[in-house]
Structure formats: structure tokens, C-alpha cells
């Protein structure tokens, strides 16, 4: 490591890579088939090496050590046979690689001023296109393995049920520019500005284009260091607005997750100890539960490490994850509902969590799904308001809540004093919960419809429930046990204000 | 409370013929369930098991008895900027959907409803919880209403 900061070493690109949004068809990252089918290839190779270790040793060392293979017919036949097997397996490998290469050749995408298009398939051709103005968000996902190779997956989620376009994989540096360009087009900004920005980003050496004139060794070293830096700090190169950044302390994340699942974790642990003492047989049941609960908590912490949120001109950018990173950008105005929630044990610390509903249909699984809905895993009230402020600038909690009447005590034993709603000029705000507090904010311009309902019990108490319908998601905006008159008033107000916000 | 929300002009009702559709859709599963429940006591000859089909029978009869009222409780109103839909006698539900939020309007015809010349109109917004389905519309009326709503939605189209 002769140069401590290889990033700063001036690289002279022989030619700046062409802009991405040029209407031309582009191919994906060349290592794509390997990364996609990588596990299979490695498994086959590993299997081969293990199986034919003896043969290889015999071939290369055996003769040196004077241990010639026995000259009996069986061994000879086996050797010939294994040679044939090797041939067959290599043949299969060649076919796989060839097919991978062919599918890579055929898998192309392009971004024009209006559309993003993807073509793929060798035998069955598939062609998808999406309009840029329907883009709901662009995520960059970097699973561990492709990340080692400097590749990333770009997920462009579209409005409605037409799902998303996934480009797996593109090179990391390329992904950032592509996202910037797509979002720029999506938020209808002038592209010129953006290419300026993109060029600035390119000034940092893209690890995939180490076309500098230095020697191979230093180039390789530079690439390795660049990759290491990228792996450890993928967000460093992202332009961020310093003021809006929330810094997440790992300790707080661990504490908050522990407090959120604390009760469950303790119960399971106690169960395991008791079972261990009195009925060891039960451990077969308890231990997997223990591993499950603790593993879940650990995953929650792990995937929220290196959390970052920032306001960019293209929208709100949220990054997550230590090993597999997710990095997504929400164009402004795509958030349909916001929920601030505070589990009971977070109250002494004043922590809140922010989750949102967004318009794109989420087709992702597991790890990435959280990032889809969680804007802030845990934060103080100032940080929480700052995050909400990214969505609704200068928002603050209204003070004039209309709460449930005292007779609602029968159905809202503890929370009837808090349970209520309020309006501000942009949103309807619903407050719920005495122990597990939530505050739901639905921008009026995003309300889909509004319902009011009651049942026999509620009617006997002259209570009713109002349901503000938003797009599907983790946030449900409803408030029950309101005075019937208040509920009708709220229902009317939400409707008329929604109509007002639409025009 | 729904009366408060409904104050003003009259609600559009669904076709009275829809009562028959609803009766049949209650009756068929009702008969199957009640009949199925009689098998156990008939075979086992345990007397108290007869309570099960008896209870099912009472529930079915009650459902049938309230069907006309339930159908009469279904109503909708086309206001200037939105559609208001109501249903339910025990559990009221009133939903207002701005025209500009309608993404699709489906006309569905089930086999029983088709026998009576009826169709149902389903409104799809970006929120699945909206759940507004107007059953029991005469087919011609359903299609006319659909066309009118699509035109209204088109003229008031707002960004998602």
C-alpha cells in the first residue's frame, strides 16, 4: 500500500464513458451471468476438484514421487472413464458459459428521454418498457457477492401494478449515474445540470474502468483499494446535503431493537432456561425459537447499520445495510402515508420510528422489504421531525386534536384521551395508542377515498370509525371510537379537503 | 350516523330484483351447510348434535329475513366531485371516492345476477381498502354508469 489515498491519485481516463441516457442500447455488466449463475459454476468446479483430487495429484505429483498408477485394467478404465466424465462436465460448463454469454449479449437496456426499455431472452424474447414519468423510485441493491465484484442491481419501481424493471447487474459506478439520470428525467429536471454532477462523480475512478496508464500492478492495487473503500463506505461518494443527514449510532440501534423485542427475547430465554433445567427434551423446540427470535433481532440491527438519509434534488435517498446494501431514492410526492410509532419501552429515550406507504408495488423479499417502508429505524424526536420534514417540509404536529369522548372509555380503555385526529393545511393527522403510540400523517393530496363505519356496539355508544384509504402498505390510517358527530365531520372534511388538494 | 352523512338529496337504490340474487346466494350455501351438519347427528344418533344444524338453520333464516332490508340499505350518490357509496344495516359503511381517484371501473356479471339481468360495478382506486362495489344494477344502467364515471374520472384525472 504505497499510496494511502488512491482515490486522490489523478486518473486520466482515456475517454470519459459515454452518457447513459443516450437512447442507445446498453449491455449489462459483463460478469452478470457469472454473478447470476455464479454459485452453480463454483459448486460444479468445487465438486470436480474434490472428486478428482486424487487424479490430479496422481497426474502432477504422482509421477514426480514415483507413484505410478497401478497398471491394472480397472484403474486404467477408471482413469479413461474419468477423463470422459471430465470432458462431459467441461462440455456442460462450456454450454452454461456459452448460454450465459449469449443471454448477456441479448440482455440490453436503454434509457431515452421518455422511456426505459429492457430486452432479454435468447429463446423467449421479453421486452418491457416503462414510462419515466411513472417511475416511483430507483433502488440500488448490492448483495454481498456481486458487491465484491463491484456490481449492483438497479431496481426501478413503476407506479401501479406493472411492477419494476430490474437491471442485474450493472457496475456500481454506472448504477449511480444511471439512477441519477433516471431520477432526473423522472422529476423532470434539466439533464444538463445532472450530467455535470455525473461527470463529477466520474472524476472518482470507476473501479471498472481503471484505464490509467500506470503499471498493471499499481492499477490492480488501486482497483483493490478502491473496491475495499467502496465496500466499506459505499455512501461516501454520494452527494448529500449535510444538514439533513441523520447519524445512526450502532449502540442506539442495538438498544432500540433490544427494547422493541426485549420482552419476547426475555420470555424465550427464560423458557429455554426453565426447560433446560426441568425438561431438557423441550429444548428441541425452544432452541430453534430462541435462534429465530435472536436471529431476527440481529438481522434487524445488521440491516439498519450504516443507515443514511439525505435530501437530494431527485428525492429522498435512504441507504441501508452493512453487508448487502440497499440504496433507494424516492422522488418527491411519492409518499402516501407516514407513520411515527413509539413502542412502550422507547418512551424513556424519546425514540420514534418512521414508516411510510409508497405507491410502487413491492415485489421484493426479506431484507430489502424493510428499506421499502422504513424511513428511519429509530431516532430522537428532532431527527424524526427532520425526516418527516423531508417529505412534508416544515411539518409540525398540530395541537388541536379532536379526541374520543369519555364514553369511548369502554372501547378504548387507556387511549381514549389520546385517540383522535387533527388537520393541518396539507395533511390529516391521526393519533392513536396509549402504550404503543402512533401518529399517522396522510397528505391530503394522496388520499384515495375515505370511509366511515359503525357497528351495533359503536352505535349504542354513539361512536363511529373513520378510515382514510391510502395505497397498500404498512401504514393503516384509521381512527375508531370517535364521537359520531365528530366522525361525520372528519369524514366530510377529509373528502372536501382531498378534493381541494386535487385541483 | 350514516343518515347525517347522507343528508341532502336522495340515494340511488339498486334494483329490487337484486333481492332475489342475494336470497339465492344466501340460500345455496345455507342449504348446503345445514344439510351437511345434519349428517353427524343422523349418523351418530347423539341428540345434542342436532343443535348444530338447528343453529345454522336459524342463522340462514335470519339472513334471509334481513336480505330485503340489507339490499334496500345499499345506495350510491353521484355528487359533483365524488361518488358516495353506502351499505349495511347493522354495520354501516359509507365511502366517498373522488372521481379523480378512480383508476378502473369494472362491470362484473355473476351467473345468478346474469339470470336476473343484473351486473355489479366495481371501483378500483390505488387503495385496495376502498372496496366499493355496487351490486344489483340493471345491465344497461351499469354500462351507462360506467361510461359516465370513466368520463368523469378522465376529466378530473389527478396525478397519482
Image: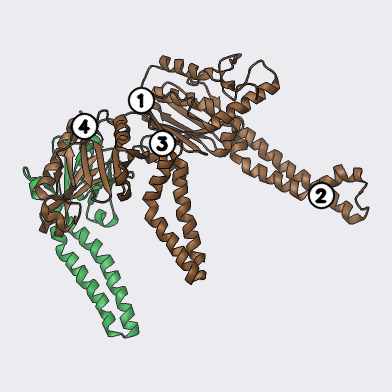
Is residue A464 among the parts visible in the rendering? yes
Q: Earlier in the sequence, mark 1 or mark 4?
A: 1
Of all residues, the one furthest to the front in this rendering is A348
Q: Earlier in the sequence, mark 4 or mark 3?
A: 3
Is disc 4 on the same chain as disc 1? Answer: yes
Badge number at residue A243: 1
Q: Secondary structure under badge 3?
A: loop
Q: Secondary structure under badge 1?
A: helix
Chain letter of the residue beneath label 3 in the structure image: A
Neighbour tally class for label 3: few under 14, some 14-19, many 20 plus, Cα within 10 Å? some
Quarter of the figure that contains the C terminus of chain B: top left
Neighbour tally class for label 2: few under 14, some 14-19, many 20 plus, Cα within 10 Å? few
Tell me the CA gap for discs 2 and 1: 63 Å
Labels 2, 1: front one: 1
**Residue A14 left/right relative to A307:** right
- The residue that disc 3 covers is A248
Q: Secondary structure under badge 2?
A: helix
- The residue that disc 4 covers is A426
Tell me the CA gap for discs 1 and 4: 24 Å
Q: Residue drawn at (80%, 47%), measured in percent from left and top?
A: A84
Q: Give the chain letter for green.
A: B
Quarter-of-image position of residue A493: top left
Badge number at residue A54: 2
Identify the hue of chain A: brown
* Discs 3, 1 touching: Cβ within 8 Å: no
Observer-nearest residue: A432 or A294?
A: A294
Is disc 1 on the same chain as disc 3? Answer: yes
Tell me the CA gap for discs 3 and 2: 53 Å
Quarter-of-image position of residue A267: bottom left
Tell me the CA gap for discs 4 and 3: 29 Å
Amino acid at each position: 500500500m504505497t499510496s494511502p489515498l488512491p482515490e486522490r491519485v489523478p486518473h486520466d481516463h482515456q475517454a470519459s464513458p459515454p452518457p447513459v441516457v443516450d437512447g442507445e442500447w446498453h449491455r449489462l455488466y459483463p460478469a452478470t451471468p457469472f454473478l447470476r449463475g455464479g454459485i452453480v459454476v463454483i459448486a460444479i468446479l468445487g465438486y470436480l476438484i474434490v472428486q478428482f483430487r486424487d487424479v490430479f495429484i496422481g497426474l502432477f505429483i504422482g509421477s514426480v514421487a514415483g507413484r505410478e498408477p497401478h497398471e491394472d485394467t480397472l484403474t486404467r478404465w477408471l482413469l479413461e472413464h474419468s477423463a470422459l466424465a471430465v470432458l462431459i462436465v467441461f462440455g456442460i460448463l462450456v454450454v452454461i458459459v456459452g448460454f450465459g454469454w449469449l443471454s448477456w449479449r441479448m440482455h440490453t437496456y436503454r434509457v431515452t428521454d421518455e422511456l426505459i426499455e429492457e430486452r432479454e431472452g435468447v429463446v423467449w424474447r421479453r421486452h418491457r418498457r416503462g414510462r419515466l414519468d411513472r417511475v416511483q423510485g430507483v433502488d440500488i441493491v448490492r448483495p454481498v457477492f456481486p458487491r465484491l465484484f463491484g456490481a449492483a442491481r438497479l431496481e426501478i419501481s413503476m407506479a401501479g401494478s406493472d411492477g419494476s424493471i430490474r437491471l442485474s447487474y450493472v457496475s456500481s459506478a454506472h448504477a449511480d449515474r444511471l439512477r441519477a439520470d433516471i431520477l432526473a428525467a423522472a422529476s423532470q429536471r434539466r439533464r444538463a445540470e445532472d450530467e455535470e454532477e455525473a461527470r463529477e462523480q466520474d472524476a472518482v475512478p470507476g473501479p471498472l474502468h481503471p484505464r490509467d496508464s500506470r503499471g498493471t500492478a499499481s492499477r490492480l492495487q488501486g482497483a483493490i483499494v478502491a473496491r475495499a473503500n467502496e465496500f466499506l463506505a459505499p455512501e461516501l461518494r454520494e452527494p448529500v446535503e449535510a444538514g439533513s443527514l441523520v447519524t445512526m449510532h450502532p449502540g442506539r440501534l442495538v438498544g432500540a431493537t433490544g427494547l422493541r423485542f426485549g420482552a419476547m427475547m426475555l420470555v424465550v430465554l427464560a423458557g429455554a432456561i426453565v426447560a433446560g433445567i426441568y425438561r431438557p427434551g423441550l429444548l428441541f423446540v425452544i432452541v430453534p425459537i430462541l435462534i429465530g427470535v435472536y436471529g431476527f433481532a440481529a438481522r434487524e440491527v445488521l440491516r439498519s447499520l450504516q443507515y443514511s438519509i439525505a435530501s437530494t434534488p431527485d428525492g429522498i435517498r435512504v441507504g441501508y445495510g452493512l453487508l448487502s446494501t440497499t440504496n433507494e431514492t424516492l422522488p418527491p410526492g411519492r409518499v402516501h402515508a407516514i407513520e411515527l410509532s413509539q413502542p412502550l419501552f422507547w418512551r424513556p429515550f424519546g425514540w420514534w420510528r418512521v414508516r411510510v406507504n409508497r405507491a410502487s408495488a413491492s415485489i421484493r423479499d426479506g431484507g430489502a422489504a424493510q428499506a421499502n417502508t422504513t424511513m428511519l429505524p429509530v431516532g430522537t424526536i428532532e431527527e424524526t421531525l427532520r425526516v418527516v420534514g423531508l417529505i412534508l417540509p416544515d411539518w409540525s404536529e398540530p395541537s388541536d386534536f379532536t379526541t374520543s369522548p369519555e364514553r369511548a372509555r369502554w372501547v378504548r380503555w387507556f387511549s381514549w384521551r389520546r385517540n383522535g385526529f387533527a388537520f393541518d393545511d396539507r395533511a390529516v393527522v391521526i393519533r392513536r395508542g396509549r402504550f404503543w403510540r402512533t401518529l399517522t400523517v396522510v397528505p391530503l393530496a394522496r388520499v384515495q377515498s375515505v370511509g366511515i363505519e359503525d357497528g351495533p356496539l359503536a352505535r349504542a355508544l354513539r361512536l363511529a370509525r373513520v378510515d382514510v384509504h391510502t395505497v397498500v402498505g404498512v401504514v393503516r390510517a384509521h381512527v375508531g371510537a370517535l364521537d359520531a358527530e365528530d366522525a361525520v365531520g372528519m369524514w366530510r372534511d377529509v373528502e372536501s379537503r382531498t378534493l381541494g388538494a386535487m385541483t | 350516523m350514516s343518515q347525517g352523512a347522507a343528508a341532502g338529496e336522495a340515494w340511488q337504490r339498486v334494483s329490487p330484483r337484486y333481492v332475489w340474487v342475494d336470497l339465492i346466494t344466501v340460500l345455496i350455501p345455507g342449504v348446503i351447510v345445514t344439510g351437511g351438519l345434519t349428517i353427524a347427528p343422523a349418523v351418530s344418533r347423539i341428540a345434542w348434535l342436532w343443535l348444530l344444524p338447528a343453529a345454522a338453520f336459524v342463522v340462514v333464516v335470519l339472513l334471509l329475513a334481513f336480505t330485503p332490508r340489507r339490499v334496500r340499505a345499499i345506495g350510491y350518490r353521484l355528487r359533483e366531485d365524488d361518488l358516495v357509496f353506502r351499505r349495511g344495516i347493522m354495520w354501516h359503511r359509507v365511502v366517498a371516492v373522488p372521481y379523480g381517484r378512480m383508476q378502473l371501473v369494472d362491470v362484473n356479471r355473476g351467473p345468478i345476477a346474469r339470470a336476473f339481468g343484473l351486473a355489479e360495478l366495481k371501483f378500483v382506486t390505488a387503495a385496495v381498502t376502498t372496496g366499493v362495489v355496487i351490486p344489483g344494477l340493471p345491465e344497461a344502467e351499469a354500462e351507462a354508469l360506467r361510461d359516465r364515471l370513466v368520463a368523469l374520472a378522465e376529466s378530473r384525472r389527478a396525478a397519482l
